[in-house]
Image (cartoon, helix red, strand yellow):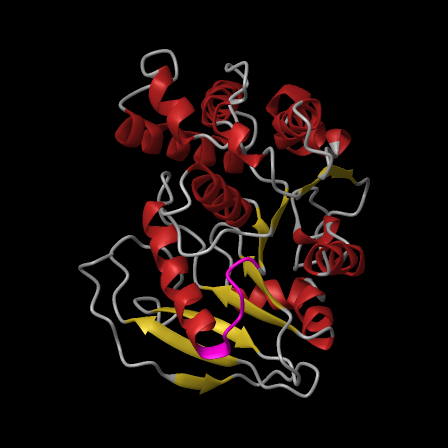
């Protein structure tokens, strides 16, 4: 990240108005060596964030992170959380992170740069940030929270709370799921993703979970193989809310996946572990038949399983403590 060329901050208007506000697009870097934002857009080499500023002094900051490969603009079409939050005097930012690395180190450094700009400009307390996202975006949020709680000097802010929509948590589980999908050879989408994941993990971790279990535990948000949950132990003292929709019939019909293959297994296991360890603010939200993609197709792994109004109520509860 230190090799980035810091570009002149450019403000661009977006033709969307939220609660009387026109969001700003701020370009932070004019290079993206870690491919944090994957897009065919002509501006794909830039790293930036959208900022929605309330009319009154912000009471906190909400950070929303896209899932793998989806644009920020598409995120804003699927949820209303950013609109509702601005109405309640919460400053909202959406960073250009939708791809990147398996360790999330460059992603966290990019977030720190954004957070420093926000704190310096608006004098918002560092303990008034709430991070959340969908799928890999939730992974970025959760790993940032774990890092902040593991070592207070390793991140610019320490999140007040964190939430995620159906995030993968255990890299060993992801490897085994990918292997099963390749062997089943039923869904072209699942096979292609499985091969890509396994190839990526061989490069990043040196091989399979059997060959290098220590690397999988080191970088996983939660490790079922570890009695303390691995890195999940750093989430014991932070409010956390995770959403998941098993959609098992859809999974069996479209992917021939069973419950062993789904994110919900690790999500429920981690929340259960955190509750057993004393985290009374670890919440699990399980939905049914709410998953719909932007194109209108049914899919349990979607932003739509999060109720924006309900999530905002939870966010305001954290900010008013």
Where's the C terminus, which quadrant?
bottom right
- Image height of 76 relative to 167, above or below: below
Q: Tell me: residue 264, above or below residue 57.
A: above
- Residue shown at 58% from the left, 39% from the top: 167
Residue 74 found in image quarter: bottom right
> Magenta stretch?
121-127
Image coordinates of residue 145 in percent, x first then y, are 50, 44
Q: Is residue 221 magenta?
A: no
For the N terminus, the quadrant is bottom left
Q: Residue at point 56% right, 26% down?
A: 186
* Residue 151 visible: yes
Residue 9 in the image: x percent, y percent? 34, 81
How many numbered discs, if any? 0
The spot of residue 209 in percent (x, y) is 39, 17
Depth check, front residue: 68 or 3: 3
Asked if residue 123 lies in the magenta stretch, the reply is yes
- Percent of width and height locating residue 139: 51, 43
**The image quarter in which residue 7 lies:** bottom left
Indicate left or right for 123 with 273 as reference: left
Quick check: 108 above or below 226?
below
């Amino acid at each position: 990240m230190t090799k980035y060329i810091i570009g002149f901050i450019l403000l661009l208007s977006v033709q969307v108005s939220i609660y009387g506000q026109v969001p700003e697009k701020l370009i932070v870097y004019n290079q993206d060596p870690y491919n944090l934002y994957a897009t065919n857009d002509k501006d794909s080499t830039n790293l930036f964030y959208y900022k929605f500023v309330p009319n009154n002094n912000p009471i906190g900051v909400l950070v929303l992170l896209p899932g793998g490969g989806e644009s920020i603009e598409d995120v804003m079409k699927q949820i209303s959380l950013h609109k509702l939050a601005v109405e309640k005097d919460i400053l909202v930012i959406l960073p250009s992170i939708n791809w990147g690395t398996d360790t999330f180190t460059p992603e966290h450094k990019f977030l720190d740069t954004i957070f420093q700009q926000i704190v310096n400009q608006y004098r918002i307390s560092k303990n008034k940030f709430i991070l959340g996202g969908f799928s890999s975006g939730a992974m970025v949020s959760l790993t940032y929270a774990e890092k902040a709680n593991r070592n207070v000097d390793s991140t610019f802010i320490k999140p007040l709370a964190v939430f995620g929509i159906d995030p993968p948590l255990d890299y060993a589980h992801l490897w085994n799921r990918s292997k099963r999908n390749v062997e089943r050879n039923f869904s072209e989408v699942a096979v292609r993703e499985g091969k890509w994941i396994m190839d990526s993990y061989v490069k990043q971790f040196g091989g399979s979970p059997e060959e290098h279990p220590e690397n999988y535990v080191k970088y996983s948000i939660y490790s079922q193989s570890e009695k303390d949950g691995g890195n999940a132990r750093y989430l014991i003292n932070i409010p956390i809310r995770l959403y998941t929709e098993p959609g098992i019939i859809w999974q069996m019909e479209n992917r021939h996946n069973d419950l062993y293959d789904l994110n919900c297994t690790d999500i429920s296991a981690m929340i259960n572990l955190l509750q057993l360890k004393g985290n009374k603010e670890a919440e699990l939200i399980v939905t049914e038949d709410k998953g719909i993609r932007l194109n209108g197709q049914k899919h349990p792994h979607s932003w739509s399983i999060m109720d924006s109004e309900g999530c905002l109520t939870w966010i305001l509860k954290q900010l008013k403590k």
